[in-house]
Structures are given as structure tokens and as C-alpha cells.
């Protein structure tokens, strides 16, 4: 008999949440005790519902999912975090694992892999999507990142990237978007890592080359 698993889902698309619940429906040992497309209420909700596993989207509108993972792990270390995302970049995998995630699953997963990932993470074992294992192994052996995928930016990252290209400072961007300076700095760091550059000039040059800014 399978152990009962209480699952919380946080994803910025309600359609994704509905799809996940449909995939989980045939498995009564996994019960969804919390679902939301808003990150703001997550920490408070975890106090009330006490899930075993949190399926966490990295691309959330109000807060960077990598930072949210860190907060959840700090306040609720007993909750096993399974990142659920389209982001294949190795730096995201490494950041999420450093910030307390136990697993990393891509959104193009099939039903059996989803169930296996939840069960494995719940058991305290690390789970990595097989596609990512191959990419990370390649990077470890060759020292080179695989580049067979497009750069994926969140809506907020696109806004900030355009403002950086328009020569606005971090403080100005924070004031224009009504977000904290630290949030801008985090997004800026993520952008440099995604585009593989070291400074603002390289960031703008790489963004223009890829057609990410006007």
C-alpha cells in the first residue's frame, strides 16, 4: 500500500494546475491539499495545510521562484520542494537545489514520471528530470553548457531587460515597476546568468543579438 502524500501546488497558470490535478486523479495516495497561482499567500498557507511535498513553479509573477524556494525551505524545512518548470538552464537547477529543493521536474513530463518524482521527493530522495541529468553530465565532463534550447525569460525579466537597455539604473527600475531594489538586482543577476554574460554591456549586446529587446 502506497504512503499517503499531501501535495501543495503553486503555479502561475491555473490551466497547468487543472492539468496536474487531472493527472493525479487516478492516484488516491496523493491528495492536493493546497493550490494557488499566487505566491504571496503560500507561506501563510503552508502553516495551515502542512503538505509533504510542494510542487513549485519557478516563473511566478510576484516573486522569483528561486528566492521563494529559499524562503519556504527556511521557514518550512520539513516540506519537500519539487521544482516544476520549463527552464532547462543548468544554473536554475543548481540554484534551486542550493536553495532547498529536493527535485527538479520539467513541465513536459508524462504522468508516470510526475508520480515517480513526487513519491521519490517525498521519500527524501533527490529527483532530477532525465533530460537534465544528461545536460548536467555533459557540462561536468566537457565544461560546456548544452545550448539546444532557447533562452526563456519571464514577463518581469523582459520588462527589466528593456529598461536596462534604455539605460535606467536599478533604483530607477525599482521605482518604475513598484518593486524593491533587491528584486531588481535578483532579476538582473538571473538575466546575466541566462544570457551567459558578465556585465551590462554584454547583457544588452546579447539581448539585441537574440532579438529580446527593441
Image (cartoon, rainbow, N blue to C red):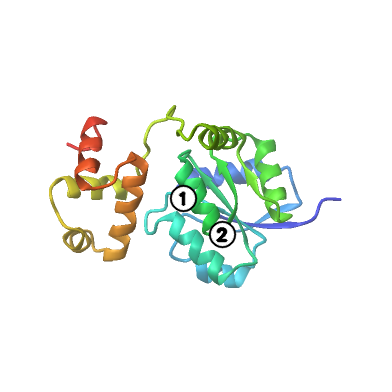
Q: Is mark 1 on a helix, strand or loop?
A: loop
| Residue placed under numbered mark 1 in the picture | 58
Viewer-closest of 67 and 114: 67
Say whether residue 107 is left or right of residue 80: left
Measured along the vertical axis of the image, is residue 110 above or below residue 166?
Answer: above
Residue most extreme to the left: 167
Query: How far from the left and from the top, in percent, is residue 101?
Result: 57, 55
Query: How far from the left and from the top, in percent, is residue 162?
Result: 20, 45
Query: How far from the left and from the top, in percent, is residue 137?
Result: 57, 35
Say whether residue 115 is left or right of residue 75: right
Q: What element carries label 2?
A: loop
Measured along the vertical axis of the image, is residue 209 above or below residue 31?
Answer: above
| Residue placed under numbered mark 2 in the picture | 100
Is any part of residue 135 visible from this angle?
yes
Say whether residue 184 is left or right of residue 37: left
Residue most extreme to the front: 142
Viewer-closest of 40 and 103: 103
Q: Earlier in the sequence, mark 1 or mark 2?
A: 1
Q: Quadrant of the C terminus?
A: top left
Amino acid at each position: 500500500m502506497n504512503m499517503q502524500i499531501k501535495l501543495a501546488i503553486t503555479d502561475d497558470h491555473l490551466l497547468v494546475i487543472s492539468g496536474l490535478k487531472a493527472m493525479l486523479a487516478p492516484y488516491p495516495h496523493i491528495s492536493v491539499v493546497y493550490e494557488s497561482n499566487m505566491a504571496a499567500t503560500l507561506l501563510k498557507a503552508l502553516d495551515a495545510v502542512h503538505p509533504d511535498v510542494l510542487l513549485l513553479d519557478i516563473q511566478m509573477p510576484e516573486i522569483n521562484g528561486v528566492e521563494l524556494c529559499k524562503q519556504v525551505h527556511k521557514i518550512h524545512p520539513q516540506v519537500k520542494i519539487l521544482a516544476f518548470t520549463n527552464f532547462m538552464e543548468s544554473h536554475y537547477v543548481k540554484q534551486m537545489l542550493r536553495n532547498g529543493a529536493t527535485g527538479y521536474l520539467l513541465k513536459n513530463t508524462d504522468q508516470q514520471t510526475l508520480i515517480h518524482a513526487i513519491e521519490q521527493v517525498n521519500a527524501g530522495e533527490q529527483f532530477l528530470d532525465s533530460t537534465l541529468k544528461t545536460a548536467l553530465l555533459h557540462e561536468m565532463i566537457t565544461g560546456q553548457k548544452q545550448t539546444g534550447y532557447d533562452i526563456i525569460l519571464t514577463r518581469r525579466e523582459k520588462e527589466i531587460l528593456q529598461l536596462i537597455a534604455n539605460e535606467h539604473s536599478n533604483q530607477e527600475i525599482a521605482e518604475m515597476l513598484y518593486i524593491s531594489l533587491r528584486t531588481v538586482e535578483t532579476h538582473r543577476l538571473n538575466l546575466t546568468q541566462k544570457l551567459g554574460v558578465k556585465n551590462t554591456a554584454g547583457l544588452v549586446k546579447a539581448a539585441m543579438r537574440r532579438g529580446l529587446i527593441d
